[in-house]
Image (cartoon, rainbow, N blue to C red):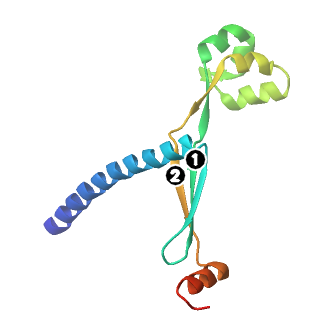
Amino acid sequence: MIQRAEDLRNKRQIYNQLEKEIKVLQADVIGVLDAEEQKTFRYETDDGRPVTMTRVQAEKMHVKEKGLKKALGAKAWNKVTKRVLDEDKLMAAIQDEVIDITTVAKHTEYIPNRPFVRFTVRSKTKASVAAQMRREGGG
């Protein structure tokens, strides 16, 4: 058990260091993609496998409840809350036109998540195999 615990501790240290290095490299790649106004970068590995790197950034909706509560008034607010805002009820009230979407929009902001890079490595295609064979003098 001691050996497993030590292995886990050591692997955790390596993992934490690699995670830091990955964050630095990822920020660097995102910076280059942003500077070049690109979202995707494609290349082939040495053995001919196509790789696609894509800048991904999600966002989430955040309703500023204090202002929305004031704008809606108590009656409408009570229809869309259970002590705190119930976003499902709010969306239903907007769809049913009980609440004006413009009012909600004035009290809503979208907060972007941290961007990350998604790697897609595909198996060799016939074309990439043929290209590799040509590079290696096979035709």
Helix, strand or loop under label 2? strand
**Dividing the image into 4 quarters, which one contains the N terminus?**
bottom left
Tag 1–tag 2 contact (CB < 8 Å) = yes
Query: In the rendered image, which quarter is residue 84 located in?
Result: top right
The x and y percentages for residue 122 are 58, 71
Helix, strand or loop under label 1? strand
Q: Is residue 5 left or right of residue 62?
A: left
Q: Which is more toward the observer, 91 or 82?
A: 91
Give the amino acid type for the residue marked by disc 1 in the picture.
Answer: Val
For disc 1, the marked residue is 56
Furthest residue in direction bottom, as rendered: 138
The x and y percentages for residue 18 are 32, 55
- For disc 2, the neighbor class at 10 Å (few under 14, some 14 to 19, many from 20) is some
Up the image or down, 123 lies above or below 104; here it is: below
Q: Is residue 116 left or right of residue 9?
A: right
Q: Which is more toward the observer, 126 or 105?
A: 126
Q: Is residue 115 left or right of residue 17?
A: right
- For disc 1, the neighbor class at 10 Å (few under 14, some 14 to 19, many from 20) is some
Could you tell me which residue is drawn at 60 percent across and 53 percent down? 40
Up the image or down, 85 lies above or below 136; here it is: above
Furthest residue in direction right, as rendered: 97
Up the image or down, 135 lies above or below 21; here it is: below
Could you tell me which residue is drawn at 57 percent across and 44 percent down? 36
Give the amino acid type for the residue marked by disc 2 in the picture.
Answer: Val
**Dividing the image into 4 quarters, which one contains the C terminus?**
bottom right
Q: Which mark is residue 117?
A: 2
Could you tell me which residue is drawn at 81 percent across and 18 percent down? 100
Up the image or down, 83 lies above or below 17; here it is: above
